[in-house]
Image (spheres, rainbow, N blue to C red):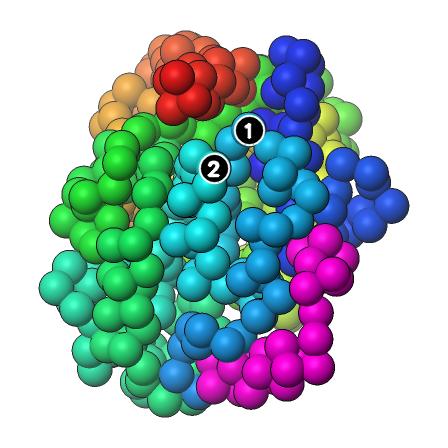
Amino acid sequence: MQRLHDSLIEKKHESKFLVGRSRFPDNPEINIIWDVTTPFRSVQNSVLSRIGNQFEKYLGINSWANRPAKYLAGADIYQWADIIDLRNLFGGFFNLWSLPDLTRKKPVVWRLPDMWALTGHCAYPYDCDRWKNGCYQCPLLRKVGRERVEPKPTILDGTRRVWNAKRDIYNQSQLHIVVNSTWMKKQVEESILGKSLSLNVISNGVNLDIYRPIDQILARKSLGLPLEGKILLWAASEKDNFRKGFHIALEAIDKLQEIYSETPILITMGGGEDKDILKKVQNQVDFGFVRDPEQQALIYSAADVFLCTTLADAQPQTALESLACGTPIITFEIGPMPEIVHEGKEGFIATDLTSQALSVAIIDFYNRRELFPELRENCRKKAERLYNLDKQTDQYIDLYEKILG
């Protein structure tokens, strides 16, 4: 949202945020839902919200939960806008039952960051396809699945009721859907959002002036890393998110330690994870959660290869940033990843979702050093061709103007 907002402002358009929570509450461009709906609050709404929020914890979305959000169509900021661009709507701040009213009075674009809109609960259903015909007996809300499911699991399985409610809401709404990959487009076409007003593919974008190839020796020197030797990178927002596959990367590195006399160095970006687990890797440098894009670009450039071990994703931003920095990627054949990485062009794809397959792919990568210059060049060219933030903004503007027309 921030990247697109900044780019829209640069192109002389007006853009404002309406959010549930913010790290920058003093920013005049950021509006909080609870503030803009103050005129519509009442004792009855507050009581119903509390009841609905409790029901939501047990069974999933509830029409009473986050009740003030049902009155957004009456807020001044809604009246100000020409077009509404929705993003991630789960997290205890939005009420899906407001969609019919919101879409009746203004054109609404909904960019899906994951598959939550299509299912009875899961943002990432992995290999489950029950969402196509009506969720029920969700495998991710049972036993070990509860440790992996996103968002936070409900106490009971209410997926059938939630899926039916979403279907009914969408049937009363007029939505233009945006997805960031052709893979995700296929999922939407097979879902309860398949009959939306329009379905558009607009990839995530990267600022190519910030995320750029930096001389590897210079990058390593700046970061205090060894100038010679193998360096692997793993990065995600959280290391302890099962879906991001950090545990598989660690197991693969452990196998490599048994093969190479000179152990590859693993550098990591991301929050979470017990430091004791990282200590199992003989050579590792953890940069923690890195917010500064310039610093991120240095870290990408310092690595020989980026291990994108995500097990379920719509389009990981880290992969696009790695491409922009000219750093090849080793990944799994899941979701949109084959669109981002073509085997032997921008990196390599492990044969299955195991640490053994990942370690084999890493060994294969280092055995083909003659390809390194070509791989790096291919990565940057692909980022320039497909993932340019400026082009992404133009695509959104074209879509907005087409809809408004």
Q: Which residue type carries mark 2?
A: Lys
Q: Nearer the viewer, residue 241 or 355?
A: 241
- Inspect this view and state whether residue 280 appears: no
The secondary structure that most of the magenta stretch takes on is helix
Q: Nearer the viewer, residue 21 or 245?
A: 21
The image quarter containing residue 363 is top left
CB contact under 8 Å: marks 1 and 2: yes
Residue 337 falls within the magenta-colored stretch: no
x and y percent of residue 59 in the render? 39, 83
Q: Nearer the viewer, residue 243 or 366?
A: 243
- Inspect this view and state whether residue 96 appears: yes
x and y percent of residue 181 in the render? 31, 33
- Marks 1 and 2 sit apart, C-alpha to C-alpha, by 7 Å
x and y percent of residue 89 in the render? 49, 56
> Looking at the rendering, in which quadrant would you find the N terminus?
top right
Q: Which residue type carries mark 1?
A: Asp
**Mark sitting on residue 106:** 2
Residue found 35% across the figure and 69% down from its top: 121
Crowding at dot 1, Cα within 10 Å, few <14 / some 14-19 / many 20+, comes out as few
Label 1 sits on a secondary structure element that is loop
Q: Nearer the viewer, residue 130 or 365?
A: 130
Residue found 54% across the figure and 24% down from its top: 206
> Looking at the rendering, in which quadrant would you find the C terminus?
top left
User: Is 403 left, or right, of 160 in this rendering?
Assistant: right
Residue 55 falls within the magenta-colored stretch: yes
Residue found 67% across the figure and 12% down from its top: 12
The image quarter containing residue 348 is top left
Crowding at dot 2, Cα within 10 Å, few <14 / some 14-19 / many 20+, comes out as some
Label 2 sits on a secondary structure element that is loop
Task: Give the tally of numbered discs.
Answer: 2
**Pointer 1 residue:** 82
Q: Which residues are magenta?
A: 32-57
